[in-house]
């Protein structure tokens, strides 16, 4: 048993030499992809943000977990009787997945990520200023994304990324700036 433990430690040692924990903050714009509708005011993008942490097992492969808010989309208009109607929906949740980080130049890296998004959605319908319907839903779906980062120091990277979240068969896209601290 001691010999097996020693062999396992020798095999894992190169991976652990490059192991690195990180925290990442993201801020940007989420697009719900609703499109325009005649006679209605459609707001299908909002501020998105995320905070995550993770661990790079080697310089190229790691894992991440975090919290993501995709903001709110809304559609509003005037009813035939002259009243107002407004429908909103927002999504947020936790995510966990794999991260790839591949060098392109001296301090420049290409990023890839994919995993599971455990989301909660809230839909509201307000007619003439009164909440008339409310619906909460949740689920687990996939996310994937790409981006690039630049190492401004040994412990900090700045970058940008695009991530697509599949929420109950609908695609929600986030385009964001990222700040990552390496430990």
Image: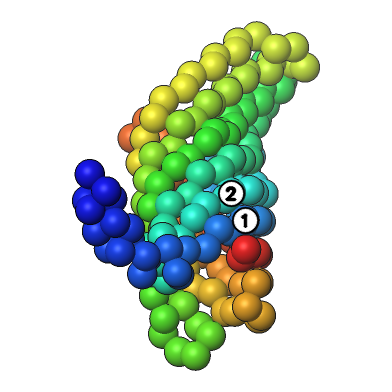
Residue in the image at 49% along x and 55% along y: 55
Q: Quadrant of the C terminus?
A: bottom right
Mark 1 packing: few (<14 Cα in 10 Å), some, or many (20+)? some
Where is the N terminus found, in terms of image quarters?
A: top left
Direction from residue 29 to residue 83 in the image, left or right? right
Q: Earlier in the sequence, mark 2 or mark 1?
A: 1
Can you name the residue that lies furthest to the top here? 132
Compared to residue 138, the image places residue 2 above or below, namely below
Q: Whole-percent x and y of residue 112?
A: 39, 63
Q: Residue at x 52, y 63 (%)?
A: 20
> Camera-side residue: 159 or 17?
17
Label 2, on which residue? 52
Position of residue 150 measured from the top left corner of the image (x, y, whole percent): 57, 79
User: What residue appears at the point 48 percent right and 50 percent down from the top-left corner?
Assistant: 64
> Residue 23 has which mark?
1
Cα distance between the residues tagged 2 and 1: 6 Å
Helix, strand, or loop for circle 2? Answer: strand
Q: Does residue 42 appear to the left or right of 13 in the view shown?
A: right
- Left or right: where does residue 56 sit relative to residue 27? left
Characterize the local packing of mark 2: few (<14), some (14-19) or many (20 or more) Cα atoms within 10 angstroms.
Answer: some
- Residue 9 x %, y %: 33, 58
Q: Is residue 14 left or right of residue 38?
A: left
Tag 2 and tag 1, C-beta contact below 8 Å: yes
Residue lying furthest bottom: 106
Could you say which quadrant of the image residue 115 lies in?
top left
State the residue in front, 183 or 172.
183
């Amino acid at each position: 048993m001691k010999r097996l433990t020693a062999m396992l430690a020798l095999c894992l040692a190169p991976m652990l030499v490059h192991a690195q924990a990180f925290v990442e903050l993201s801020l940007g714009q989420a697009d719900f992809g609703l499109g325009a509708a005649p006679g209605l005011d459609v707001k299908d993008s909002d501020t998105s943000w995320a905070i995550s942490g993770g661990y790079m097992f080697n310089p190229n492969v790691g894992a991440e977990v975090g919290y993501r808010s995709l903001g709110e989309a809304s559609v509003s208009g005037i009813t035939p009787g002259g009243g107002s109607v407004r429908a909103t929906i927002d999504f947020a949740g936790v995510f966990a997945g794999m991260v790839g980080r591949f060098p392109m130049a001296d301090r420049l890296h290409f990023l890839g990520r994919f995993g599971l998004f455990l989301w909660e959605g809230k839909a509201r319908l307000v007619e003439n200023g009164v909440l008339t319907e409310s619906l909460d839903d949740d689920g687990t779906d996939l996310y994937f994304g790409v981006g690039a980062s630049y190492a401004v120091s040994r412990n900090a990277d700045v970058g940008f990324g695009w991530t697509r979240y599949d929420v109950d068969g609908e695609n929600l896209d986030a385009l964001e700036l990222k700040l990552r601290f390496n430990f």
